[in-house]
Amino acid sequence: MANMNLYSRGDKLFVITNMVLIGLFALSTLYPFIYITSLSMSAGFEARAGNVILTPVGFTLEAYSKVLSEPQFWISYKNTFIYTIFGTLMSLILIIPGAYALSRPQLYGRRFWNLMVAFTMWFHAGLIPFFLNMRDLGLLDSYFGIIIGFAVSGFNIILLRNFFEGIPQSFEEAARMDGANEFQVLWRVYVPLSKPAIATVALFCIVSRWNGFFWAMVLLQDEEKIPLQVYLRKVIAELSDDEEFATSLLNASYSVETVTASIIVCSIIPIVLIYPFLQKYFSKGILLGGVKE
Amino acid sequence: MSSDFDTAGSPATETLVVNAKESVRERRAAQIQRVGDHLKREWQLYIMLLPMVVWLIVFLYKPMYGLQIAFKDYSIFKGVANSPWIGFEHFQTLFSNDQFLRAVKNTLIISAYGLLFGFPVPILLALMFNEVLSQKFKKTTQTIVYLPHFISSVIIAGIVITAFSPSAGIVNTILGWFGVDSVYFLTRPEWFRPIFIGTGIWQEAGFQSIVYLAAIAGVSPTLYESAVVDGASRWQMMWKITLPSILPTIIIMLIIRIGNILEVSFEMIILLYQPATYSTADVVNTFIYRQGLQGGQYDFAAAAGLFNAVVAFILVMTANAISKRFSRTSLW
């Protein structure tokens, strides 16, 4: 439709109005991020007084130096990297071979195994049994618990399985002729051909790990192990609940608002950095995993 | 089944029985042989499958076994298996518990409003993106509106809390320009749902439009070409060609949404609500979280969770069946 000619004045008006509306929607999406960024770089008393609207008022980076000098910030940041990297690797190690096996027509009980995966997407035992199970397994307050406990998702398995199923058998014939076993066929034929799908799954994992909050909050008490999101939540809750603390923090250079805003900015930056990849693969991913003929 | 045959009597039938037994045995042996051969040839596949299946059993199926505490007087020291059965007692308590009933009601209301206001937005967005002529403008705006989807709920909640703060928040600053007194929005029960649902739309509408854009991309160009010959305007084509063409997708998405009506993003609610707003904000999962994980009433909270899961399961399966019939396209 893009290169279609515009025939009437009505069409021109329509196209322009449409662009304006979309532009406004995009701006309203972007604005909170601009607001928070400006807030993080404003002087504390200006932020407190509600004077920050669009650009920083009384520009200062004091809030950042306050945040970055907090040891707990770095501990949590490091933990988030650990959970993201090892969690994603764990997911791929479990999901890639599993999905490959599910995609093979000669697998016995294929319907049963597939149903076993699909059922987990329709029925969850719920928060309490999952929590008690983690506790019984001795996985509370443990790095390993967070890394293993959330490694597999039915959606990702099915996404990858669908992709493997779509690869024509002829691709593996040469490898089979050379006497390759299943592991070699997977590694040399299917994995290279499925790079986009694997990248999609990996990015799904990375984002959910980076953003994961609820279970980390529930399962981790030890401050040495909490990820960034839990730390961020603690800071926001403490700052916004405790007015006395808030006033004690208030001086000319930073305030509750600017400190909160600067932690938010610090934790968004990595997501923004990988955003070009995310955008490229995610839209493919939701279409790949969602509807299957 | 063999004992029935043994008592059958006459010698003729006996030999028949023996033959039948023989052939069953042979067939079984052949089958074992086949399975054996298969495993010898394909054992690697099962090695690949094993870790994932073990994971599913340990982390998802074992908790389903643990759901039995919903019918038990659970004690940490006795464990899941050894705690005494008490039947439906927790469910009786549950359905006479005002907070639980309120949570069920809030879940349905928040979902219904979310559906009513949130469902049309991505469709409209997709239709509008499709009418943008400049590819550069389209790409840029899409990049922007997809972004919030990737931001954690903690950060989104942090932004909301900051923006709606009574002293410094931008919302109250702007209201101040019009002479409106500062409102502490997040302590007001009547404001919780609009803020929560609005935040959800702001965060997800852009990303959800991808599904509809994909459907629009599949509409045959000849439809538009013949409409242009007939002198149709772009406005008319949008409503009379594009929208009807993606109607199947819209209906499938609607069915999925209705099937997931009990799924409210409770993580975001936990981050935004406070005791002052429980009356409108508390949903089933936040109720379970408070009673069980914070209050330690595991068995009672598990009963609430089981109720939730069973109803959700029925809804999802129904939605799946309907959409399968509707489009001959299975969701999974």
Image (spheres, rainbow, N blue to C red):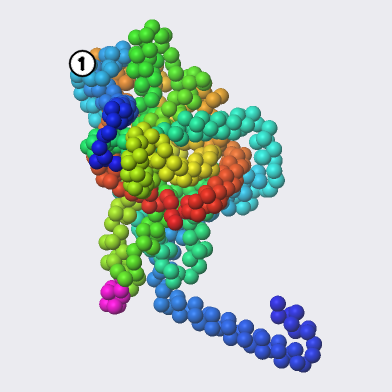
- The image shows residue A143 at horizontal and vertical percentages of 37, 47
Q: Is residue B238 above or below residue B47?
A: above
Identify the residue at image location x=37%, y=37%.
B237
- Residue in the foreground of this view, choosing between B249 and A51: B249
Based on the picture, tell me whether residue B298 belongs to the magenta stretch.
no
The image quadrant where one finds the N terminus of chain A is: top left
Image quadrant occupied by the C terminus of chain A: bottom left
Q: Quadrant of residue B234?
A: top left
Q: Judge whether A228 appears above or below B44 on screen.
A: above
Within 10 Å of disc 1 (Cα), the crowding (few <14, some 14-19, many 20+) is: some
Quarter of the image for residue B195 reads top left
Local SS, label 1 = loop
- Residue name at image x 35 percent, y 39 percent: B230
Image coords of residue B257 (percent x, y): 50, 40
Q: Residue, x 38% and y 6% (percent of image)?
A: B179
Per the image, the residue denoted by label 1 is: A58
The picture places residue B174, in percent across and down from the top left corner, at 35, 14
Relative placement, left or right, of A43 versus A146 is left
- Residue A121, x across and y down, in percent: 49, 50
Residue, far right? B9
Which residue shows up at 36% across the image and 58% down it? Answer: A163
Q: Is residue A4 left or right of residue B96?
A: left
Query: Is residue B22 in view from this perspective?
Result: yes
Q: Is residue A213 among what the camera can see?
A: no
At label 1, which amino acid type do we have? Gly
The secondary structure that dominates the magenta segment is: helix
Nearest to the observer: residue A199 or residue B124 = B124
Chain bearing mark 1: A
Q: Is residue B256 above or below residue B37?
A: above
- Count up the numbered dots: 1
- Which stretch is magenta? A172-179
